[in-house]
Amino acid sequence: MFKKIFNPKVIKFLLGGALAAAINLLLIYWLIDILHFNTPFLRNLANLISIEISLLASFFIYRMWVWTGGSWQFKDVLLKQLPLYHVAAGSAVLVRVLLIFPVLDWLKVGYSLNTLVGVAVSASINYLLSDRLVFKKNQDSDIYRPESLETVLSQEPRLHYISDNYHIDCLSLVIPAYNEEGCIVSTVELITDLLDQEKIKYEILVVNDNSKDNTESLLQQLHQDNPKVRYINNYYPNGFGFAVRCGLENFTGDAVAIVMADNSDSPQNILDYYYKLQEGYDCVFGSRFIRGGKVVDYPNYKLIINRMANLFIQVMFGLPFNDITNAFKIYRREVIEGITPLISHHFNLTVEMPLKAIVRNYSYASVPITWQNRKTGISKLKLSEMGSRYLFVVLSLWLEKHLSRGDYQRKIAAPAMVYNKSLNDND
């Protein structure tokens, strides 16, 4: 019995409820004491506003942390889940106010004990109704929770199209590099050692983004030691997006993976991508935030912003995939041709490429990957400069998805259909 009462799900529910209650109290304090909602009408209005906002907060806390999974389609959230959650939470409040409190007060139970009993009973009712009514579909599906920070991930089957001619003969890796003398050699050598060991035909194309340090001379030496490693100097203006686009215009393989120069991406995951792509998918996207995924030494503020940005994109596009903003992904050559021209100059390219591939109906699978923070050098990503650029790309592709009438979508005559499980088939 105690295991049922104190299972992790219930504990998370109680912690989420406590956080929502804290939000409620802070809002009341802010409205009444700071904004001076001092009249009886305004105090009641402040109470209603704080209750509604805390209810919405608790819904999304439970949705992302306690009952993960399920649909994030806008109409499902707005027209089904939120109204049902209001019914569940409202029923719990009404039972407490109209039944528990009057009965215990009639029995002359002290106010403190009365309040504790009322909160416990209403929380139990809310949990049971939410579990059985609001989020029922989520717990019936095969949910995998990430090890580092729980997030939404739908496991509902998605139909995708797979080409009959899906074999990848040569794999290309495009690595943009700007002032990476401290890590570019070790990054390339780790990858080449692994690919040589697996006897995979490959080329590594490093795009020197007009580095001011010793990066170019190191690339020259790498090419002399291994002809399958080559480099070009970025002929566009400086910038991550321009450097990657330069590489995408010059790779020669049947598929291309975008890999960071700082060794933050695990070379082993390149093999995961390669073998998954050989199954026939057009793209394979890695996620650090599903079962089996891992992040090491991720700055907390960047992690919070990352999760909020990815949640925003998921809700807008109704996606099961939860790590759009990560650059480390792999695409077949025909996908690169189908999503061009690319317009992003900077790190917003990491969002443009996968979203454009999804919107244009290319098939994809996702696999868990490992990411670790760079050991040397300085990160080139400046979040303060990227927000509006990310939003521009997301909104432009949202408009394409809903207004283009499929003009840019991939057209296939007689496709074979498969399920994309958004995880390894072995899981």
Image (cartoon, rainbow, N blue to C red):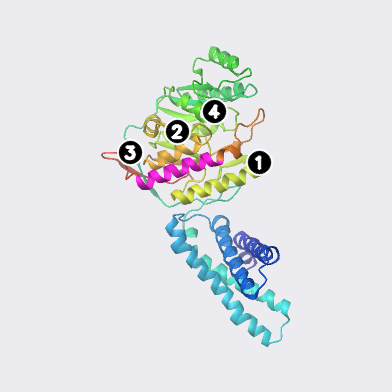
Q: Tell which of 370 and 183 is nearer to you.
A: 183
Dot 2 or dot 3, earlier in sequence? 2
| Amino acid type shown at disc 2 | Ile
Examine the structure image and report whether residue 245 is included in the region drawn in magenta.
no
| Amino acid type shown at disc 1 | Pro
Task: Indicate which label's residue lies in the foreground, 4 or 1.
Answer: 4
Residue 247 lies, in percent from the top left, at 47, 24
C-alpha gap between disc 4 and disc 3:
29 Å
Dot 2 or dot 1, earlier in sequence? 1
C-alpha gap between disc 4 and disc 1:
23 Å
Crowdedness of circle 1 by 10 Å Cα count: few (<14), some, many (20+)? Answer: few
Q: Are marks 3 and 1 in contact (CB under 8 Å)?
A: no
C-alpha gap between disc 2 and disc 3:
19 Å
Task: Indicate which label's residue lies in the foreground, 4 or 3.
Answer: 4
| Amino acid type shown at disc 4 | Gly
Q: Are marks 4 and 3 in contact (CB under 8 Å)?
A: no
Q: Tell which of 418 and 35 is nearer to you.
A: 35
Query: Which residue lies most toward the top here?
Result: 224
Examine the structure image and report whether residue 398 is included in the region drawn in magenta.
yes
Per the rendered image, the range of residues in magenta is 387-403
Residue 415 lies, in percent from the top left, at 29, 40
Circle 3 residue = 410
Crowdedness of circle 3 by 10 Å Cα count: few (<14), some, many (20+)? Answer: some
The mark found on residue 239 in the picture is: 4
Circle 1 residue = 299
Dot 3 or dot 1, earlier in sequence? 1
The mark found on residue 260 in the picture is: none
| Residue occupying image coordinates x 38% and y 40% | 363
Dot 4 or dot 3, earlier in sequence? 4
Magenta region, main secondary structure: helix
Crowdedness of circle 4 by 10 Å Cα count: few (<14), some, many (20+)? Answer: many
The mark found on residue 343 in the picture is: 2
